[in-house]
Image (tube, rainbow, N blue to C red):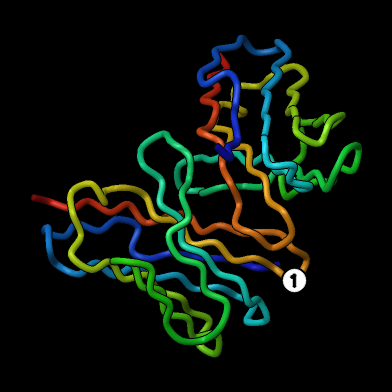
Amino acid sequence: QQKVQQSPESLTVSEGAMASLNCTFSDGTSNNFRWYRQHSAKGLEVLVSIFSDGEKEEGRFTAHLNRANLHVSLHIREPQPSDSAVYLCAVRTNTNKVVFGTGTRLQVLP
Amino acid sequence: DMKVTQMPRYLIKRMGENVLLECGQDMSHETMYWYRQDPGLGLQLIYISYDVDSNSEGDIPKGYRVSRKKREHFSLILDSAKTNQTSVYFCASSQGYSDYTFGSGTRLLVI
């Protein structure tokens, strides 16, 4: 069964400094990975979807996938206080189920 | 405007009462999901529905049941709610391998 772990649990950065979030998974046969953002007590919005090893950029958000290392990361360029939220990594399994990580709480200080 | 709508947003129930959480989507997505989100546990899948009357247990189905009589509507039912079912419940829908569209959640408190 696919297991998804995120680190760190919480992260504080200053406005404008790069924020890097990590996600490891247990089954390298998955090929469908997404990063979501969740503002407090609200629904989830998808930020980046990545389906092959390498890099995928969507605006200020860049995902890096390395399936051999069972690792996908999210880098936020020039984070702003409005980016303060919980970030969730999601891995779609070969049975079309999506497994979520427990999230990283990001705080961006002005 | 494509969206998933959850009702109610907030709900307080006493232990032993029945609970009905409603979810609707306007995108004709085949697949719908119910998740619960708890601190430290992330989002856990309760049930998946692949279409009308085609439902499958997720990872934590115990204590829950679902109903999908129309493609656009998916209900989560708690028969005799328990305090450990206090949580935030999210509904989502998708078509094929498309991104999930999530509702805004229902915050349930069982006292």
Tell me if A106 is positioned left or right of B88 in this view.
left
Q: What's the chain of the residue with tag 1?
A: A
- Residue A30's place in the image compared with B62, above or below, is below
Q: Residue at x 73, y 13 (%)?
A: B18
Front-most of A52 and A58?
A: A58
Question: How far from the left and from the top, in percent, is residue A109?
Answer: 12, 51
**Quarter the N terminus of chain B occupies:** top right
- Residue A26's place in the image compared with B21, above or below, is below
Question: How far from the left and from the top, in percent, is residue B105?
Answer: 53, 32
Question: How far from the left and from the top, in percent, is residue B104?
Answer: 50, 33
Tell me if B100 is positioned left or right of A48 in this view.
right
Where is residue B24, by image quadrant?
top right
- Residue B16's place in the image compared with B59, above or below, is above
Front-most of B66 and A52?
A: A52
> Label 1 is placed on what type of residue?
Asn
Q: Residue at x 53, y 40 (%)?
A: B37
Where is residue B46, by image quadrant?
top right
Q: Residue furthest right?
A: B53
- Residue B9's place in the image compared with B56, above or below, is above
Tell me if B25 is positioned left or right of A78 in this view.
right
Where is residue B97, by image quadrant?
bottom right
**Quarter the C terminus of chain B occupies:** top right
- Which type of secondary structure does the marked residue at label 1 adopt? loop
Q: Residue at x 52, y 86 (%)?
A: A53
Question: Mark 1 = which residue?
Answer: A94
Label 1 crowd (10 A; few <14 / some 14-19 / many >=20): few
Q: Residue furthest bottom?
A: A68
Q: Residue at x 67, y 45 (%)?
A: B93
Q: Residue furthest front?
A: B1
Question: How far from the left and from the top, in percent, is residue B5?
Answer: 59, 29
